[in-house]
Image (cartoon, rainbow, N blue to C red):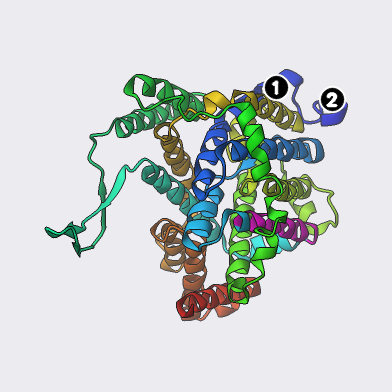
Amino acid sequence: MNGLFKLRENGTKVSTEIMAGLTTFFTMAYIIVVNPGILSQAGMEWGAVFLATIIASIIGTLIMGLVANVPYAQAPGMGLNAFFVYTVCFGLGFTWQQALSMVFICGLFNIVITVTKIRKYIIKAIPKSLQNAIGGGIGVFVAYIGFLNIDFVAFSGATVDESGAVVTSDIVPALATLNQPALWLFLIGLVLMIVLLVCNVKGAILIGMVVTTIIGIPMGVTTMADSVSFTEACAALPSTFGAIFTPAGLPSLFTDAAKLPLVLITIFAFSISDTFDTIGTFIGTGRRAGIFSEEDEKMMDKSSGFKSKMDKALFADATATSIGAIFGTSNTTTFVESASGIAAGGRTGLTSVVVAICFAISAFFATFVSAIPSAATAPALVVVGIMMTSSFKEIEWTDLSEAIPAFFAGLFMALCYSISYGIAFGFITYCIVKICKKKAKEIHPILWVATILFILNFILLAII
């Protein structure tokens, strides 16, 4: 163990790494339930996505632990799965097979730009304020989806005449009438998770989901009627495994030339979101804990190949996305919940290996996992969103030249129900502000190209 993971060199021991791995797993295990619940809305089978989520998490986390030797766990990312369903499938009209194909290409793209160092240049091209706004905006979007999934926020305002015809259709959002058991269960779960998180209870989100699910039994919200067994999940896996290689997958993306710019923009949005999720987690937790030192980051900037830990970790993250798409899930990314394991003392890849083993064991509990109601998973989306908004604090809101692009990037994701549109408005307003301030030279060429592509996309959508 010491030779493989360099435990002594990193000032840790086996027992500490095991405890750190268990801590990380229990803080992120909610994804096993939440991810199938979100992706199944696009028409994918719940059982197939359940196993794809676990398999992608196992492979990605093992690569992170054994290749990069860092204590980070990987799984399908929150925000990215929402983008997959609500923006790409529902908003843009792509099928889930096409969306998976774009995730696969995104993974290959990320591998290429990681190997060639382009990923580093993309990260540096986008100002820190926009990076933070994108991270926080995804949090607002995720929390909003949590409220919508349980119909806590209702849309009303339409009136009808005596014949039933709609007279006015000014739809406005409003708080739902709290007369449904599911809504009360959601509130119970939300309060419970908030209390557990504030009290620093390990695995607060998972514990909250389990307790909420149990409370839902006498309320009639939690039932086993539609649960899926491990055997049924295995039988469903072929419906998503390799779907990207069928005629409905990769080949169908390039049959309509008019949609090609939209496809490229969507892949770019997947890549940007994935990149910021990952690099934000690495820098935010790794530097503070000493996992990625400043010397390691300098080595990443100057050296070629994969000599630094950061290079290896970015490569592990990129490969996991393509592997996950083959099995049938959205972008697999490095989870910020890994910070809980790092706080518990995790310093090497052994922590990641423990997390991967826990994911493998969880597959056999499909019957119980699939019975967890949306009233128990929706609070998890809300509190995860709250935690993701912490990056807003890094933005200088008193400086309008920084605040305006950050506002559009951060808030428009939820208002437009699209991560890519939030990024687009952030980029466009950033360029406008810089031009007005006569600082257009400060805009990186990569940012100019991305902004022009976004504008062209809006024009094409208007014409089509």
**Amino acid beneath label 2:** Asn
Residue farthest to the front? 163
Q: Classify residue 136 as left or right of residue 260.
A: left
Give the SS element for disc 2.
helix
Residue depth check, mark 1 versus mark 2: number of the one nearer the observer: 1
Q: Secondary structure at mark 1?
A: helix
| Front position in the image: 457 or 128 | 457
Secondary structure mainly formed by the magenta segment? helix
Residue type at tag 1:
Ile
> Which mark identifies residue 323?
none
Q: Quadrant of the N terminus?
A: top right
Q: Magenta span covers which residues?
A: 99-116
Identify the mark nearer the N-term, 1 or 2: 2
Relative height, residue 271 to residue 393 (above, below): below
Is residue 437 visible in the rendered image? The answer is yes
Which x, y percent locates residue 342?
Answer: 64, 32
Mark 2, residue position: 2
- Does the segment drawn in magenta span residue 114? yes
Give the x, y percent position of residue 407.
Answer: 42, 61
Please give left or right for residue 445 compared with residue 177 in the image. right
Provide residue 199's location: percent of width, then percent of height.
43, 25
**From mark 1 to mark 2, how far is it between C-alphas?**
14 Å
In the image, residue 78 lies at what x, y percent?
Answer: 54, 45
Is residue 10 in the magenta section?
no
Which residue position holds label 1?
18
Determine the residue positioned at 39% across, 33% down.
Answer: 375
